[in-house]
Amino acid sequence: MTKEFEIKYYNQNEIWKDYDNKREIDRAKMTIDLIPKDVRSVLDIGCGNGTVTNMIHAPFVVGLDLGKIPLSHVKASTIQASLDTLPIKEYKFDLIILTEVLEHLDDETYIKAIKELNRLNAKYYLITVPFKEPLDFNLCKCSACGNLFNMFHHYRRFGKDWFIKEFKDYSLEREQYARYLCFSNEKITKLRHMFNIYQHSDYAICNRCGYPSVRPKTTPIRCILSGLIIVDCRLKEILNIRKPYYQMILLKRRID
């Protein structure tokens, strides 16, 4: 992952428009409801355009993000910085929030980021991540270098108890799940890739060279596979086969 291209991706105004809908606002409210009553200071890391940050009512609130463009929409104080090198002193905040942030980090950045987060020694961590996300479903193909990359720049998949290993000095206070979906069929996804059929987004940017994704052509096999995806989803809806898409956890620092 090249940080230059990550910043280029997050500095697109268009991708933040998707967060101005009722579904995202309702989920932001769910996140806010998990904030403990004794919290006085909050750092929202990866705050984006402030969907969550702007709803927080605390004496001291700061939003931190990699991109300059999304920060322009945040009403609280802001810091432009990367999660793997946080310009924050330890014990500065009661609560640190990360909503859909950690899945955007490659292995090297993730390891450094977890160390940085533990260094801050906040009393609470409120973290939300996609739960058992099928990353292959949203693969795009770069139009220049042919690199395969996730449309939303998601690089990590999170299971049930991933936080136990990463935050050993913290215990789980609350856990809940949000937005139940009919997940994609892995076999159909593999078939799509076998025929060199990938996703496309006007805002997708290759994390290797910064070029856009290949715009797919309409072919008979593509139409057939798209139809199979629709049928598979409809059957799961009828049978009520759904899985949670977001895991929401509140961690509290252990007292020795």
Image (tube, rainbow, N blue to C red):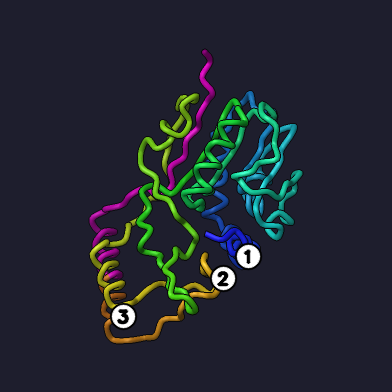
Amino acid carrying mark 2 in the image: Gly
Amino acid carrying mark 1 in the image: Lys
Picture quadrant of residue 223:
bottom left
Kindly report the distance in space between the C-alpha atoms of the residues bearing marks 3 and 2: 26 Å
Q: Residue at x 40, y 37 (%)?
A: 162
Front-lying residue, 178 or 117: 117
Where does the magenta region start and end?
Answer: 229-256
Front-lying residue, 94 or 51: 94
Q: Which one is in front in this view, the residue at disc 3 or the one at disc 2?
A: 2
Indicate the position of residue 15 as horizontal and vertical percent values.
Answer: 58, 64
Amino acid carrying mark 3 in the image: Arg
Element type where label 1 sits in the image: helix
Comes first in the chain, label 3 or label 2: 2
Picture quadrant of residue 160:
top left
Magenta includes 61?
no
- Contact between marks 3 and 1 (CB within 8 A): the answer is no
Q: Residue at x 53, y 75 (%)?
A: 212
In this orientation, does residue 17 appear? no
Q: Which mark is residue 222?
A: 3
Comes first in the chain, label 3 or label 1: 1
In this orientation, does residue 220 appear? yes
Kindly report the distance in space between the C-alpha atoms of the residues bearing marks 2 and 1: 8 Å
Element type where label 3 sits in the image: helix
* Residue that badge 1 annotates: 8
Indicate the position of residue 248 as horizontal and vertical percent values.
Answer: 47, 39
Element type where label 2 sits in the image: loop
Kindly report the distance in space between the C-alpha atoms of the residues bearing marks 3 and 1: 30 Å
Magenta includes 231?
yes
* Residue that badge 2 annotates: 210
> Is residue 41 left or right of 124 when viewed as pictured?
right
Q: Residue at x 27, y 74 (%)?
A: 194
- Contact between marks 2 and 1 (CB within 8 A): the answer is yes
